[in-house]
Each structure stands twice: as structure tokens, then as C-alpha cells.
Amino acid sequence: MTADLIDGKALAADLRARVADAAAAFETACGRKPCLRVLLVGDHPASQAYVRSKERAAHRSGLDSTVERLSAETGQAALLARIAALNADGGVDGILVQLPLPARIDPEAVIAAIDPAKDVDGFHPVNAGRLMTGLGTPLVPCTPYGCLLLIRKALGTASLAGRTAFVLGRSNIVGKPLALLLLAADATVTIGHSRTADPACLARRADILVAAAGRPHLVGADWVKPGAVIIDVGINRIPTEDGKGRLVGDVDIASVRPIAGSVTPVPGGVGPMTIAVLLRNTVLAAAARNGVSIADPAEGL
Ligand code: GUN
């Protein structure tokens, strides 16, 4: 048996096409495009590449998106003032502050300053609380929601109810929100982390295994239940002889493929989904803020 590769590029393209339809419907109703503002502080090279990709994808799906590049010397007060201005601007639907921020700036204070209705990253404590309690409709963090869509795709018509899931990683950006999404979908969820004793043993019992540990090729054959769905959130650059480096995930794909049922590749798995979900969140935020009824582009994907 060889595990199927779950094609994140194709699923993301489907979602972006649905977002484009929803954005066009919003424009017909409101006379303007859904509007995303991205704030980038400093010149972190990976962040520069991420925000360029986000902006390009947003334009292709018919969103109004601009990146505001602030100098590396920008202080917290100036950034908070910029966020306050975007919060007050009725024509702005989504605000994203690219992380990581320079060490001088407290990311928690910055995230808490964003209007929860415009928090398309889903990082604000109000959105995190809605996700945790199931009370109200949260904007959900992009990478975890992208993982959930990939898992649903891999399962086909089968339900998540009654399945066991092991999420390796407990960050606020990936591990915790993904565990809550899987729980809300009636999976039985275990969260592992760097202090977990024998994570491979827990992983081997899981129908769904998500690796978000940031450790290259950590997950090998001895972590995998036969037929499991494996989602690899890791993006690790490892050195190569030509000096350019190579991106690898947390999963040793060659080792798990003979056992797993399906697995996401790196690159081309979770990465493209994160951006597509950001666009989906922006359209949903625009619709909710403006009282426009638009179907969730991810529904029935
Ligand atoms: N940096 C890496 N991933 C993300 C993300 O999903 N959102 C933001 N704002 N910054 C990031």
C-alpha cells in the first residue's frame, strides 16, 4: 500500500475560486470589493515572501488588498495607532499583522488591539473564546482551518465523528485551535507537545495525525496507524550541499507512505490552504460587517 498524497494546491485553488464568486457577490451587494489590510513591520525575509503571496492571491480572487510596510524601527505605540485607524475605517474588512514582530513589540497587545470583527487571522482572544466555547461565530485561524478542510477532503464522505486524532503541537496559531476544531467535529482529540512522554505511542493510535512540531522528519513509520490521515504542518529549511537549503516537513514522508492512508506533501499541502482560508475569512468578515448574506465559500468544498 502507498498512501495517497493530499493535493493542497488543488484544494486551495478550488477554495480561491469559490472565494472569487463570493467576493463578486459582495461587490454586487455593496459596490466595493472586500478589503484586506496587511501590516508588515521590518524586513523579516520569510514574512516578506508570505505577505507578497497573500497580496497576489487576494488580488486574483477579486479582493482589495494592500500591504503597509512599516520600518523595523516602528514602535508599539505607532503600530497600535495604525491598527486603531484601520479599526475605525468602515471600508476596511480585514486586518492582518504579520508575525513575528520585532522583539520590542508585544504581539499579545497588538493582537488584542484588532477589532475582533476584522481579525481575519482569528487570533484575538474574543475569537479564540468563541472557538473554545462554541458560542457565537468565530473567525478561525487560517492554518488550522485549512488542515480541517484537508482532513475532510481525505476522509471523503466519512465523518470525523468517533475518530481519534493526535495533534502534535500546542501553539495558539496551530495546535490548540486545530484540536478545538477537531473536537467540534466530534473527533476524540489528544494534544502532544515537546514534554509529552512517548508521543509516537499516542500517535500510533490515531486515525488522524497532525504534525505541527517544527522538527524536520520527526514523524516516521513507528508513529503511524495503518490507513491514518497525516497532515504535515511543518516548514523546516534544512541545509543542502549547494547552500540553498530545502524545505521539509515534520513528517518523513518516504517512511510513512507504505503505512498511512493519505498524507500531505511539503510544499504543496497545508501552505497553499492557509492563504486560501485567509481570503475566505476576509470575505466572511466583509459580509458579516456589512449585513450581506453570503454562503461560506468553504461549505461543501
Ligand atoms: N506568520 C506566520 N504565519 C502567520 C499567520 O498565519 N498569520 C500572521 N499574522 N503571521 C504569520
Image (tube, helix red, strand yellow):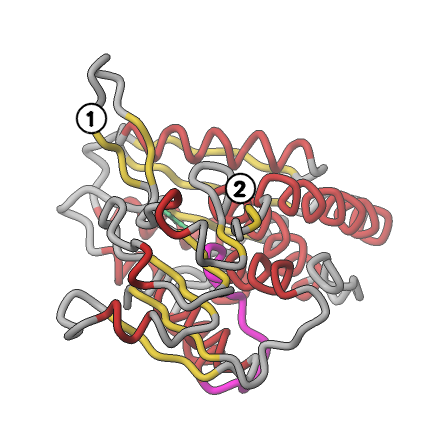
In the drawing, does residue 107 fall left or right of residue 22? left
- The mark closer to the camera, 1 or 2, is 1
Q: Which mark is residue 97?
A: none
Quarter where residue 244 is shown: top left
Residue 252, given in percent of the width and then of the height, sits at: 33, 46
In the drawing, does residue 241 fall left or right of residue 249? left
Q: Which residues are magenta?
A: 133-144
Image point 33% across, 38% down: which residue? Answer: 248
10 Å neighbourhood of mark 2: few (<14), some, or many (≥20)? Answer: many
Viewer-side residue, 121 vs 236: 236
Secondary structure, mark 1, is loop
Q: Residue furthest top?
A: 242
Residue 173, given in percent of the width and then of the height, sits at: 36, 60
Q: Where does label 2 land, which residue?
A: 272
Q: Which mark is residue 239?
A: 1
Q: Is residue 125 above or below residue 12?
A: below
Image point 26% across, 31% down: which residue? Answer: 44
Kind of residue at badge 2: Pro
Residue 33 part of the magenta-drawn span: no
Q: Earlier in the sequence, mark 1 or mark 2?
A: 1
